[in-house]
Image (spheres, grey):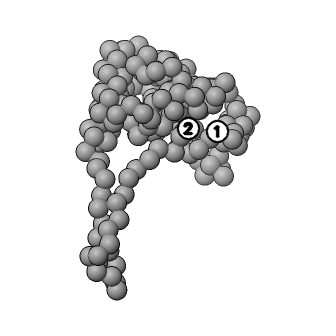
Amino acid sequence: RAFESAKTAQKEWVEKPLHERAEVLVKAADLLEKYKEDLAELLVLEIAKQKDDALDEVMRSAELMRATAEVAKSMHREVLFSDSMKGYDKSKIGITHRVPFGVVLAISPFNYPINLALSKIAPALVSGNTVVLKPSTQGAIAATCMALIVSKCFPRGVLNTITGKGSEVGDYCVAHTSTDMIAFTGSTEVGA
C-alpha cells in the first residue's frame, strides 16, 4: 500500500512547480523545529544519544531541509556547446533537464535516524519524487515520528513510512517493482 500510495501521489507531486515543492520543504523544516524537544527526547530514549547531540541532530536536519530547498531552486537547465568535445564546433548544443526517478526507497541507519533519513527524503521530494522510508529497526520510533510530523506538510502519499526487520521488509522493498531508486546508508554487508 505504501508503494501504491507513493506511485499515485508522484503523478501529481511532480506537476507542482519547483518553487512550490521547495516552499513545502521549508514549511516541513519549520514544523520539525517546532517538535525538536519531543524528537530529541525520543532519540535519547531510543538510541541513547546525549540530549545536546539529539537536539543538534534535529536542528541540523531542519537546516539540511532548508538548504536543500535553496539549492534545488538554484539548479537550472544547462546548455552545452559541442565545441567542448574534440573535433566539434559550436554548431550544435545540448540542453540538460533533470527529471525525477519516481518512487525513491530511503533506507536509513540507526545512528542518525532523523538526519540520515532526511538527507535522502529532502532531495528526493524537492526533485519531484515520492518516498517510501524504511528506517533501521533501532531508531525506527524516532524516524517514524519525524516522518509523521513532516508528512503533514505534504500531500497524502508523498512521504510514506514502513517499518520492520530489514531482512524481511527491507528485502521486499528493494525488490518491489515500484522502487525506481534506492537511497541507502548502512554497512557493506547490508548494502550487498
Q: Position of residue 184 (x, y in %)?
A: 55, 44
Callout 2: few (<14), some (14-19), or many (20+) C-alpha neighbours within 10 Å? many
Look at 38% across and 53% down and name the residue there: 97
Specify whether residue 93 is in view: yes
Residue nearer the viewer, 48 or 36: 36
Q: Position of residue 82 (x, y in %)?
A: 32, 74
Q: Amino acid at mark 2?
A: Val
Which mark identifies residue 36?
Answer: none
Q: Which element is circle 1 on? A: loop
Q: Which residue is mark 2?
A: 103
Q: Quadrant of residue 139?
A: top right
Q: Position of residue 71 (x, y in %)?
A: 28, 43
Is tag 1's residue or tag 2's residue first in the polypeptide sequence? 2
- 154 displayed left or right of 191: left
In the displayed orientation, state which residue is furthest to the right: 168
Q: Quadrant of residue 33?
A: top left
Residue nearer the viewer, 164 or 77: 77
Contact? badges 1 and 2 (CB < 8 Å): yes
Residue nearer the viewer, 150 or 93: 93
- 52 displayed left or right of 162: left
Spatial CA span between label 1 and label 2: 7 Å
Q: Quadrant of residue 141?
A: top right
Q: Amino acid at mark 1?
A: Ser
Callout 1: few (<14), some (14-19), or many (20+) C-alpha neighbours within 10 Å? some
Look at 29% across and 62% down and name the residue there: 79
Residue nearer the viewer, 29 or 138: 29
Q: Position of residue 147 (x, y in %)?
A: 48, 22
* Total numbered badges shown on the rendered structure: 2
Q: Which element is circle 2 on? A: strand
In the displayed orientation, state which residue is furthest to the front: 91
Q: Which residue is mark 1?
A: 178
The N terminus sits in image quarter? top right
